Amino acid sequence: MAGIQGLGEQPLLLGADAARFFLYKPPGLTVFPPHRNPSLPSLLSFWEQQPEFSIQAWPEGFAGGLAHRLDTGTGGLVLAARTPEDLSVLRQQFSQQFLRKFYYFYSSGRLETSPLLTLPIAHHPRKKDRMVVQNHPGTAHRGKWYPAWTRFRSLGEGWWEAEIRTGVMHQVRVHAARAGLALEGDALYGGKPGSF
């Protein structure tokens, strides 16, 4: 899963508007410091070193005003709010599906379902590092089911666009696998070895 072409593999502050900062997170970097080793580099530690960063009273789980997360292996845009009030607006926009997110990936699979998946997602009943899709009412899971909305669009030659309007952990990966489009290099959900 590659970063945005041309941006390299270092985090960047791409720009800002009146309410948000736009940060680039390269693949391989976590958004927040890992619990087991908080001294490791993360997008948050990069952000805290920028002149535009300001210390504010952020809600738990949103340090630095970072409004959402990307999987460690995924590169892309992360929004950071300027103030706690701006963060509240951003969170509402995400929860009301006002903001649309697009992901691009390669798969050697074939689409086996409708391009629109709305199957809920939950934590795997035994494996903490993965999620499951609710294929039927009795699907084994842990915790609650989260609503999930993903639409896939072929870009040709094995490349796909995934649009999501919800933000469940591993949503693109687990919905893609369910649709027959396991991401190349994503062994956790059945993808073939590789690195894109």
Image (cartoon, rainbow, N blue to C red):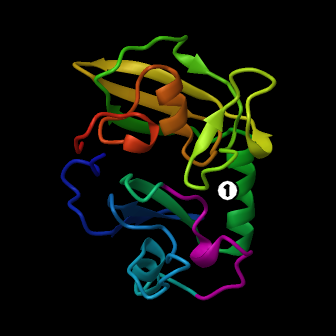
Which residue: 28% across, 51% down?
3
Query: What is the chief secondary structure element of the magenta stretch?
Result: loop
Above or below 41: residue 90: above
Quadrant position of residue 134: top right
Quadrant position of residue 47: bottom left
Which residue: 47% across, 28% down?
177
Q: Is residue 15 visible?
A: yes
Q: Is residue 18 visible?
A: no
Query: For mark 1, what is the residue?
Result: 90
Above or below 87: residue 97: above
Q: Would you say residue 186 sits in the magenta stretch?
A: no
Q: What kind of residue is marked 1?
A: Leu
Q: Residues within 10 Å of mark 1 (few under 14, many from 20)?
A: many
Task: Identify the image quadrant of the C terminus.
Answer: top left
> Residue 84, how many percent across, how many down?
71, 73
Closer to us: 24 or 130: 130
> Residue 173, how many percent across, how many down?
48, 38
Q: Start and end of the magenta stretch?
A: 55-70
Which residue: 26% across, 69% down?
10
